Image: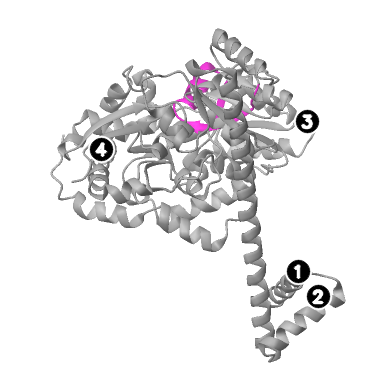
Amino acid sequence: MLVDEVPDRARWVGDALAHAGMQVAIAEAGRTLLKRIADVEPDVIVIDIESPDRDMLESLSVLSTHQPTPIVMFSEKRGTDFINAAIAAGVTAYMVGEIDPSKVKPIIDAAMAQFQAFQGMRQALDETQEQLRQRRSIEKAKLLLIQSHGFDEARAHQFLRELAMQRRLSMPEVAAGILESAQADSG
Amino acid sequence: MNKTDLDIAYLPLVDSAPFILAEHLGYFSQMGLKVTLHKEVSWALVRDKLAIGTRDAAQMLAPLPAMTTLGVSGMRVPLLTGLGLSKNGNGITISAVLWQQMLAGLQLAEDYPVSAANVTDVIARAARQTEILPRQLTFAVVHGFSTHAILLRRWLRSAGVDPDAQVKMIVVPPSQMVDSLSAGVIDGYCVGEPWSTLAINLGVGIAAAWGAEVWAEAPEKVLCVTEQWHQQNPATHHALRIALMHACGWLSRPDNALEAAQVMSAKQYLDIEDSVLERALSGHLARTRNSAVEQVPNFLSFFDNQTNDPGGDSALQILDGCNDLLGRSIDPVQRHMLARRCFRSDLFHHTLQEFDDSAVGP
């Protein structure tokens, strides 16, 4: 989806993208944009780097159930190093004046690939944190067993494992259960 | 001194006053800095320009340095703040149509008095009756990771409304808020001034609550730089904080509100009528088009330790608010790391030590 306030430019860029084999929807910036995105569900959004709508686009994945969407920026400002520096820093962007179908397609492909890599990284980070949390709750449950039952570390571990097997649960689930019931007893 | 020619980004809002007044009063130059202020259109663009190095420092929403460091908002860049620039200053506005609809449904008079307590009470009662509020409400904030979003969720809960199940939250640029409200696209919003007052003056909205009535000490805008820039220019960063703190001190004196409003109303800055700005800066606000202007206590602060120290309890409150926005808990170890790394209380205290001795004055 191409978001642009300048109709002539939008048509020109849209034609160039369509020529490169893409299916292009042109949207107006501003009030109606959110609804258009919900209706069209674009694979990628192309928008002016100086557009006030950028905060809205970036917040979509945080505030709502919208699928996060990769965003490609364009700029018409020449004579500044900004766009070049932006590209160097990993922002996927291109200069409008330089648009030619053979160049834009790779930029958009790169943006989508980079976006998927970033999403993958976020997910991996969440998973690592979850694993850490689980390991910590197992350690805490063991400590509780050592203190309350006089177990040693190996015995506590064995106890948790046996309980997990009996109840067909995972170790972290059993550990969380033990911690919860201990908290309920003390509270 | 490291770098002395600085490019600083801000958004044209009432609470960009410290930057504009520091320039106007000559505080930057008195600290040996040559500052160029750049008016920007989005926080995303401000962040990109900081990350790329086309801007040295910027005004920023209080949650954004930590959330950008964490990498959950756009790109992942280590950012930090060593100075809070403002506290509070926001308002929650609901549409006048929604208000009248709820009053009628509850068989209350059309001129039922508008106060923070009355509005939450009416919403709480209306929300329990599906025939009065038959649909999901839509509220807007200016950014996903903002004090506004945290504040709005707190307020909705205080009115017995579940912010996830009963409300759709969207992001709308400040300048489109009033228009979206009057067109019925949204039922309400949380934003800084003058956007509440503009809707109230037109009669399309009423003030449901002022920010300080929901969250008494809410960090709002901060001075933000990249971690890398700070490491390369610690002395410049320090001088910049001192200059801005003097501007904050100047703004805290009620007598200066009119002059500040006149300076900020210029086309190059906010380009908004000075009388509207003065009301926001001095906290003289009305809740409806027909009600009297009242002094809202603690409406917007620029200068006290609570405001200017970015760390401590307020940093933790921001991080907890972000947990609420993310819908998941930031790992406790990471929370601790973010609090220390992004909200630099130590830098503020360093500034404070030399602030009183620094020979800066109007």
- Magenta part of the chain: B185-207
The structure residue drawn at horizontal position 59% and vertical position 39%, both measured from the top left corner, is: A114
For the residue pair B98 and A94, the one nearer the viewer reads as A94
**Residues marked 2 and 4, same chain:** no
A145 over B95 or under it: above or below = below
Which circle marks residue A173 in the picture?
1
Q: Three-letter amino acid code at disc 3?
A: Pro
Residue A62 relative to residue A55: left or right: right
Residue B161 placement, left or right of B236: right
Instruction: Report helix, strand or loop for mark 1.
Output: helix
* Discs 1, 2 touching: Cβ within 8 Å: yes
Q: Do the residues labelled 4 and 3 touch (CB within 8 Å)?
A: no
The residue wearing badge 2 is A164
Residue at the spot 86% in from the left edge and 71% down from the top edge: A168
Q: Mark 4 lies on which chain?
A: B
Q: Where is residue B132 in the image (x, y as percent from the top left)?
A: 76, 30
The residue under label 4 is which amino acid type?
Answer: Ala
- The verdict on residue B203 being magenta is yes
As measured in the structure, the alpha-carbon distance from the residue carrying label 2 to the one carrying label 4 is: 62 Å
Q: Select label 2 or label 3 by which is in front.
A: 2
Give the x, y percent position of residue B40. Answer: 41, 27
Q: Residue at x 54, y 25 (%)?
A: A53
| Residue B143 on the magenta segment | no
Residue type, label 2: Ala
From the image, tell me which residue sits under label 4. B247
Quadrant of residue B350 within the rendered picture: bottom left
